Image (cartoon, rainbow, N blue to C red):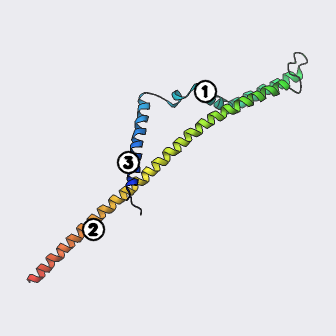
Amino acid sequence: MAHIHTQEDLQVLDYLRKHRREHRQNIFQFQDNHITESVKLSLAQRISDMVATTVGSWQFIIFQSIGIIAWIVINSVSNKNLWDPYPFILLNLMLSFQAAYTAPIIMMSQNRLSEIDRKQANSDFEINVKSELEIELLHQKIDMLKEKELLSLAKAIESLSQQIQNYTAKK
């Protein structure tokens, strides 16, 4: 069982306790002021999240598939008003533009979410270190209490032994 013996461990624990208190106060302030995470996002971040959410949904895939099928059917069946005859170069160009613009926008959203995940992982790590140090301190305190109790019991036994010896010596 490792005990906290170094001043450095105690300093780390004090820092983590202070950091946790500040973090809790910030959370309570946000809740009190009704400030949400989305309010702090920039316009570009909100747009990238909306695009990622929309493009990454079944609703969008189904809507786009219906649109593509309708485009192909209308341009294949109708002999008049053909705006994009086979091989559907305009459709191909539109889908290429869509892919060219949505991919980086989705990556921006994912990068921001990855940063949030990294911060959460760091916070979790700090909590784990703090918990480990707190548990070690508790073990150390319990061990000290046990030692005091054993010392107290040893003194009581010694006192009782002395009283018994005195009593038997008087007889």
- The secondary structure type at the circle numbered 1 is helix
- Please provide percent x and percent y for residue 165: 14, 80
**Disc number for residue 14:** 3
Amino acid type for the residue under numbered disc 1: Ala
Residue 141, image x, y percentages: 33, 58
For the residues labelled 2 and 3, say whether their Cβ atoms are less than 8 Å apart.
no
Task: Identify the secondary structure beneath mark 3.
Answer: helix
Could you tell which of marks 2 and 3 lies nearer the N-terminus?
3
Q: Amino acid at mark 3?
A: Asp
Please name the residue shown 64% across and 31% down the image: 53
Reading the image, the residue beneath label 2 is: 150
Query: How many residues crowd around disc 3 within 10 Å: few (fewer than 14), some, or many (20 or more)?
Result: few
Distance in Å between CA atoms under marks 1 and 3: 39 Å
- The disc placed on residue 44 is 1
Describe residue 116's horizontal placement relative to residue 65 as left or right.
left
* Mark earlier in primary sequence (1, 3): 3
- How crowded pointer 2 is (Cα within 10 Å; few <14, some 14-19, many 20+) is rated as few
